[in-house]
Image: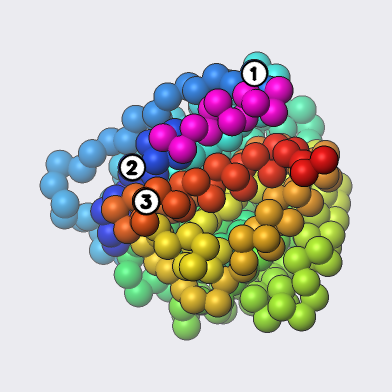
């Protein structure tokens, strides 16, 4: 998927991660791995987005519906979903699949959203119209309606069970959405002051309060560009590679991780596929890789 952002190239992110041997390296941890292939993305008839306040929304929704069904099938099979992106708008499909599966079991899910950006714009607040700046808002029921209504109920995740980590770039009009949403936010200031260990302890407690567990949606641009240069919207001052691993290690150690996705890898902007290599290492940490 690359329709949610302003730059082309993130649609090749999953291929870059596969080239970095994700499947084999997860298998080396002792897991049985099935690569279920790519989720089809509807291509627009032209590059005219039709609605400038939510560009290519119809095509993005179509893809998220397909992704939702794939995630549900994985969970119904008793397996763990690892979703590779693509721009971050795909998270609406992933979260919809997880929340639908657990809703049928009478359960709620929590959400930890790692990102340099808040992703809480709406068609009313956005300056760009790029939908990859709206998926967390949609998961919390703020819109756009076509994405916010993908789950079994609205919101897909209760704001009190949603946590945003690593934020350091928020649009002016978007700030109001963040402040009024009720989500727990750890900006980079809080990460610096508290340390990633304390941030993740508090985040997991919040995301797991009264839920079956949490989904981790990891945008690699939350890392500093020195760690992950191959992203479309880099913002200096992100977390280090070691802090990123600690975040993932906390997720693994919680035994409450329900699903994992990694988004916004852009091989066109990368250096020697280094960002995809970092992404693979981080996935391995989230799945329980240990030093000893």
Mark before the other along the chain sequence, 2 or 1: 2
Q: Nearer the viewer, mark 1 or mark 3?
A: 3
* CA gap, disc 2 and disc 3: 14 Å
> Dot 2 corresponds to which residue?
12
Q: Name the residue located 41 percent from the left edge and 35 percent from the top edge.
A: 19
* Of 238 and 256, the residue lying toward us: 238
Q: Residue at x 42, y 24 (%)?
A: 37
Q: Total number of numbered labels? A: 3
Q: Which residues are magenta?
A: 19-30
Q: Secondary structure at mark 3?
A: loop
The earlier-in-sequence mark between 2 and 3 is 2
Q: Nearer the viewer, residue 133 or 154?
A: 133
Let me know if residue 163 appears in the view: yes
Farthest-out residue, front: 292
Residue 18 position by quadrant: top left
Is 137 on the left-hand or right-hand side of 155? left
Residue at 23% in and 39% down: 43
Q: Position of residue 162 (x, y in %)?
A: 70, 57
- Residue 44 lies, with reference to residue 171, above or below; the image says above
In the image: residue 241, left or right of residue 87: right
Residue at point 50%, 46% (across, down): 277
Asked if the stretch drawn in magenta spans residue 21, the answer is yes
Q: Are marks 2 and 1 in contact (CB under 8 Å)?
A: no
| Secondary structure at numbered mark 2 | helix
Q: CA distance from mark 1 to mark 3?
A: 28 Å
Identify the mark at residue 46; answer none if there is no mark: none
- Circle 1 sits on which residue? 32
**Residue at the disc numbered 3:** 272
Q: Residues within 10 Å of mark 3 (few under 14, many from 20)?
A: few
């Amino acid at each position: 998927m690359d329709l949610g952002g302003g730059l082309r190239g993130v649609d090749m992110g999953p291929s870059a991660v596969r080239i970095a041997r994700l499947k084999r390296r997860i298998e080396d941890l002792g897991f049985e791995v099935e690569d279920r292939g790519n989720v089809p993305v509807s291509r627009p008839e032209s590059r005219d987005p039709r609605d400038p306040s939510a560009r290519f929304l119809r095509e993005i929704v179509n893809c998220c519906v397909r992704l939702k069904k794939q995630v549900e099938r994985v969970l119904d099979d008793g397996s763990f979903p690892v979703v590779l992106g693509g721009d971050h708008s795909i998270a609406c499909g992933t979260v919809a699949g997880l929340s639908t599966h657990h809703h049928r079991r009478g359960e709620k899910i929590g959400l930890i959203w790692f990102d340099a950006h808040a992703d809480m714009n709406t068609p009313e607040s956005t300056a760009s119209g790029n939908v990859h700046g709206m998926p967390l808002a949609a998961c919390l029921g703020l819109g756009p309606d076509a994405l916010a209504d993908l789950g079994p109920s609205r919101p897909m995740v209760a704001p009190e069970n949603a946590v945003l980590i690593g934020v350091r770039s928020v649009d002016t009009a978007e700030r109001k959405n963040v402040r009024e949403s009720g989500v727990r936010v750890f900006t980079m200031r809080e990460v610096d002051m508290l340390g990633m260990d304390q941030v993740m302890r508090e985040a997991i407690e919040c995301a797991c309060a009264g839920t079956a567990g949490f989904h981790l949606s990891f945008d690699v641009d939350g890392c500093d560009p020195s760690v992950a240069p191959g992203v479309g919207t880099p913002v200096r001052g992100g977390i280090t590679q070691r802090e990123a691993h600690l975040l993932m290690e906390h997720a693994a150690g919680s035994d409450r991780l329900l699903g994992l996705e990694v988004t916004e890898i852009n091989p066109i902007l990368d250096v020697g596929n280094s960002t995809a290599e970092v992404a693979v290492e981080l996935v391995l940490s989230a799945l329980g890789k240990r030093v000893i």
